[in-house]
Image (cartoon, rainbow, N blue to C red):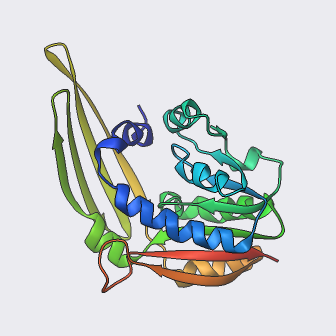
């Protein structure tokens, strides 16, 4: 099982609902202020953000490379598909990439990914996404978490080094009197605001705003929300 699919299978146990709600609220408010008629959510996961935007009058479509996540989203009746954005020929008024999507993309592929985001937008369309700050990676994300219930044991260990966050996931699922072990490692990449701004402008975006987002502490931002417009 791929690491992201493994993460999808345990996401309900991680108790991130409050942080996700606050981020969706911040990005959703920004999206609605642009008044798009159509929106594509890239890395849509289980489709929650699409669901919220759809109920605010926007026609949505979600894409994700995790078949497990898409399976869950489609079971809820949310319009999603397991497809790479480079294979999409429809254009949208707004594109979003919510909750760490950009941080999952390595530097070699990042420019190509951002160009694909540019290409699926209508002229004047907006691309809105969040990234983790250095504080978010080096202070908030690191550490160890264990979850033990009747039929599942989960161990997560996250370490940040050389501008990368390594998250090791181990899951033991109880099957009769035995436990089946699954494990995987997720890598995330830290990018500075300056680096991303330069890259986005080179592609053809105007960075209209960078919004500080404090999901965990008030003293320092753990995320930034980028608001970009296709020129």
Question: In the figure, 211 relative to 20: above or below?
Answer: below
Residue 211 percent across, percent down from the top left = 53, 81
* Along the viewing direction, whichever of 123 and 190 lies nearer the viewer: 123
Query: Percent from the top left, x then y, of residue 45?
Result: 52, 46
Question: Nearest the camera: 166 or 131?
Answer: 131
| Residue 61 in view, yes or no | yes
Residue 231 percent coordinates (x, y) = 82, 77
Q: Quadrant of residue 49?
A: bottom right
| Number of numbered discs overlaid on the protein picture | 0
User: Which corner quadrant of the image does residue 112 belong to?
Assistant: bottom right
Q: Position of residue 52 (x, y in %)?
A: 58, 54
Q: Nearer the viewer, residue 225 or 32?
A: 32
> Image quadrant of residue 169?
top left
**Residue found at x 66% / y 59%:** 113
In the rendered image, the quadrant that contains the N terminus is top left
Answer whether residue 129 is visible to the viewer in this image: no
Q: Is residue 192 left or right of residue 218?
A: right
23, 203: nearer the viewer? 23
Which residue is farthest right? Answer: 123
- 84 on left or right of 132: right
* Residue ranking furthest to the top: 176
Q: Determine the residue positioned at 15% across, 29% down.
A: 150
């Amino acid at each position: 099982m791929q690491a992201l699919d493994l993460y999808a299978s345990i996401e309900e146990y991680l108790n991130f609902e409050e942080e996700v709600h606050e981020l969706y609220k911040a990005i959703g408010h920004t999206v609605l202020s642009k008044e798009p008629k159509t929106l594509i959510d890239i890395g849509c996961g289980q489709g929650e953000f699409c669901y919220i935007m759809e109920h605010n009058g926007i026609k949505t479509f979600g894409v994700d490379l995790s078949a497990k996540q898409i399976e869950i989203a489609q079971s809820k009746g949310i319009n999603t598909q397991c497809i790479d954005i480079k294979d999409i020929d429809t254009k949208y008024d707004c594109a979003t990439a919510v909750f760490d999507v950009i941080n999952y993309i390595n530097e070699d592929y990042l420019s190509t990914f951002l160009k694909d985001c540019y290409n699926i937008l209508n002229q004047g369309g907006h691309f809105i996404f969040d990234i983790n700050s250095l504080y978010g990676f080096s202070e908030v994300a690191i550490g160890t978490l264990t979850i033990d219930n009747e039929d599942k044991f989960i161990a997560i260990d996250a370490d940040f080094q050389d501008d990368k966050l390594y998250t090791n996931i181990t899951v033991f699922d109880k099957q009769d009197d035995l436990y089946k072990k699954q494990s995987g490692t997720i890598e995330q990449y830290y990018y500075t605001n300056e680096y991303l701004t330069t890259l986005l402008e080179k592609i053809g975006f105007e960075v209209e705003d960078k919004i500080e987002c404090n999901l965990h502490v008030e003293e320092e931002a753990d995320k930034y929300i980028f608001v970009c417009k296709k020129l």
